[in-house]
Image: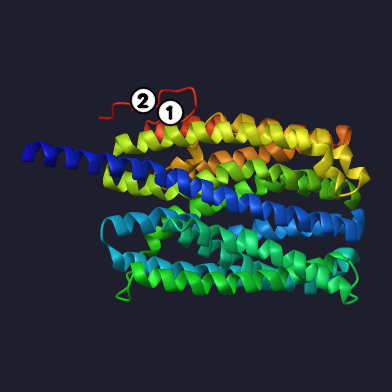
Amino acid sequence: MAASLAAGSSLGAALGRLKAARAGPARAALDVFAIRIAAAGFGYGAQVLMARLMGGAEYGIFASVWVWTAILGHTATLGLSQGACRFLPADQARGDLDAARGFLAGGALATLGAALAVTLAGLALIGLDGARIAEPYAAPLLIAALVLPLFALQDYLEGVARSQNWAVLAIAPPYLLRQGLIMATMVAAVLLGAPPRASVALACTLAATGLALALQAVLLRARLRRVLPPGPRRFGWRRWFGACLPIAAVDLAAAGFGFVDVVVLGFLLPPSAVGLYFAATRIQQLVVFVHYAASAATAQRFSALHAQGDRAALAALVRRQARAVFGATALVGLALVALGPLLLGLFGPDFRDSLPILALLIAGSVGASLFGPGEDLLTMLGGERLCAVITGAMLILAALACLALVPAFGPIGAAAGLAGVTLLRGYAMARAARAVHGLATPIWSGLSLRTRP
């Protein structure tokens, strides 16, 4: 009887641990998604406020400059933000805390150094070739150069927090606090008499980013000291950059892929048209947040399970993520299309014309979610170089599609071109993940493991 009770207790404990392990990623994903939805509310409110205050032309200038800030800011991390999710969990799982401490310090220094180098290069370019920069863009570009290193460092801290499964600490400061501060400082600036221009909006962004970064850094440092006490550091620069530089190429291409339509429109169409299109992309980001939330909750778990050699658990996690992300993406997408006239109308009466653009962009995201987390597997488990090649090729294809379609069809052509290439990119990532890791990621697959020699 005692043996039976002990066995039952052990079985119950094991089932409890299994349930907790399964619930962990789902709970983290829900936390991330809830924060990103709240952040999207603040961000959406901020964009509506800026569009209303600045008008279509100034809002278009702000959108164009902010796109470049985001692209360069993500790139300046040199892939170390994603690398944190790959290396830190694996080093901690192996008990190699010296390497983990070295990555934390080295990654922060490398990110800050690269961001400052990009900033100085941008300031030098503005100073040397300022006459060729159109006057409406000169002041916003100057302020954006100051935002960039803060943006990059916060991107790195987000990756570190994600690596420890601290979803709220990773996501809330950059996407909730920063957005709220941007909105509050913009309102305060205008009430104090500042002109509602793109340069003022970017100055508010600079202040908000600095405050959010400072708070996140203090909280993250305090929590890290509890899991990684002070001690020796070992720096594996060659190993880190061997993986992270291809990831940086992926990040650059992915950031460019996400904004290539806006960049092409900025070159071919007036700022007012860019503003109309950018408003649709801000709403479409709610769909993208579904994948982001799932990735933030599970990417580091992919790395840890791979390091532990638990292939069955890894396959199960991939299967759950793929199907959950598609279902959530489809539901959110349908809701946004239904609410599109209302959401776009808040930007101004003319912005309702962007509804077909919004519908096409959402269709591309929903279609891509059918193919599962192929990109996450490639960046976390190995295959980042192939991922970079695929993303770079898709970026070029998206740019060509936009260049071909925008002159004839305007903004709707850019949306159609990007949606089609987004679908193709999801398929290519799924094929690559199957080839490299033997995992079939699309939602209709059984995710059977290929026998490896």
Front one among 122 and 185: 185
Q: Residue furthest front?
A: 1
Q: Position of residue 425 (x, y in %)?
A: 59, 34
What scheme was used to colour the molecule? rainbow
Task: Mark 2: give few (<14), some (14-19) or many (20+) Cα within 10 Å.
Answer: few
The answer to whether the residue labelled 1 contacts the one labelled 2, judged by CB atoms less than 8 Å apart, is yes
Q: Position of residue 186 (x, y in %)?
A: 80, 68
Front one among 197 and 397: 197
Which residue does the image show at 42% across and 50% down from the upper left? 300
**Alpha-carbon span between mark 1 and mark 2:** 7 Å
Q: Position of residue 299 (x, y in %)?
A: 45, 47
Which of marks 2 and 1 precedes in the sequence? 1
Which residue position holds label 1?
Answer: 440
Q: Is residue 440 above or below residue 36?
A: above
Q: Is residue 110 left or right of residue 395?
A: left
Is label 2 in a helix, a strand or a loop? loop
Q: For residue 188, which quarter of the picture?
A: bottom right
Is label 1 in a helix, a strand or a loop? loop
> Across the whole image, how many numbered discs are drawn on residues?
2
Q: Is residue 337 left or right of residue 97?
A: right
Which residue does the image show at 47% across and 33% down from the upper left? 432
